[in-house]
Amino acid sequence: MHQSTKIIDPHIHLWNPKDTPKNVRGLVKMFGRWPWLLERVTSMVFPQSVINFVGKPKYFLNNHLPETYHKDTGKYQIEGYVHIQAGWEGKKPFNSVGETEWLMTLKDKPLAIIGEAHLHDLKHLDAVLDAHESASPLFRGVRDSLAVHSDKGVMDFNELGEVLRRDDWRKGYARLGERNLTFDTFLYAHQLPDFIDLVQSHPETKVVLDHVGTPVGLSGYHGGVGRTSDERKRIQESWYQNLAELAKVPHVRLKLSGLLMTFCGFHFEDRENPASLTEVLDAIAPHIEYAIETFGIDRCMFASNFPVDKVSTSFETLYDAYFKIVEDLPIEDKKKLFFDNAVSFYNLDI
């Protein structure tokens, strides 16, 4: 039934933590022969905010390569995928180009590569982007993770803090548009007002908001957020209001993904078995329906965010839920959500 609609997955992460510069590389090389010990040491070494995010360390400590991904997709035949930068370590400006070079060594290559570049570093930005483009014709754009939070139990992904407010970072963001490169935005829902101001000011840059804006504590406690039902209600109301404002900016696209990360507080990661289809639908369907209604079919795309969402459910269950949510839509609308919109946004050659 589902395979009548072709699927491109526009948001996955690939990594090899033993042989590439990841922040767990040393631990994996030292303790990788003993998985139980590796997970225990990792939980002791990293800050609690990181452990809160990871949920189940094994998915971050083990390889996630194309063969792993395609095994997870099960009954779903994926036409191709887009790799999104995944924490390639290194302080020097050009280190991130190594990830693009590494991806080009894979037998099963992505349809597109979204790499890393520090947009505030105007001195090196153009040269870094040139290097990415030289390393691969698949390079399409950048993700510079913006998610930061005032609660110490919620993981920060940008050591510079609220870069959305920095003039140098905004100039780098505008430079992407001048070079016809895309931008993927990962931030938390409380940062949406600053993001709205950014995209209103720079319509020249093609941009997609990842993971529907990541509302921390939406359905349960995470790292100090979402302690009470009243707080969770306020989180959802504010998130919905900001998504509605963002939707007024016509060039912004939205990825329907990532709601099963630990941040949202469903706590499926705490269980031994992955969440069922009914549980996944109960958790995410109302929010995805709101997002599609608010942004419209032409501006949304379904994505897996694997292996990060793997802590909560299987790929098959996740995509069963996606298809169930849109089962009453015309086939052309489904084609846009699962295939066409990703092809258009990333200019995929397929």
Image (spheres, helix red, strand yellow):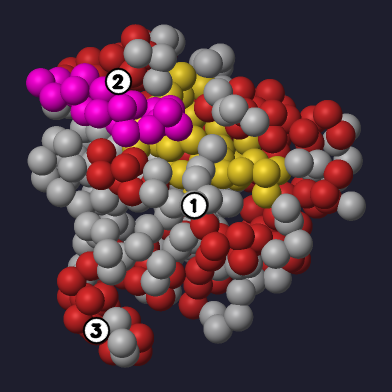
Q: Which mark is residue 173?
A: 2
Badge 3: residue crowd in 10 Å (few <14, some 14–19, many ≥20): some
Name the residue carrying label 1.
107
Instruction: Residue 76: give x, y in percent of width and height.
Output: 73, 56
Q: Give the CA distance from mark 2 to mark 1.
A: 32 Å
The type of residue carrying mark 1 is Lys
Q: Is residue 104 visible?
A: yes
- Which comes sooner in the sequence, label 2 or label 1? 1
Q: Is residue 50 above or below residue 190?
A: below
Span shown in magenta: 122-141
Q: Is residue 330 above or below residue 226?
A: above
In this rendering, the label closer to the viewer, 3 or 1: 1
* Residue lying at 43% horizontally and 10% vertically, measured from the top left: 203
Badge 2: residue crowd in 10 Å (few <14, some 14–19, many ≥20): many
Name the residue carrying label 3.
31
- Which comes sooner in the sequence, label 2 or label 3? 3
Left or right, 113 with respect to 71, comes to left
In this rendering, the label closer to the viewer, 2 or 1: 1
Helix, strand or loop under label 3: helix
338 or 277, which is in the foreground? 338
In this rendering, the label closer to the viewer, 2 or 3: 3
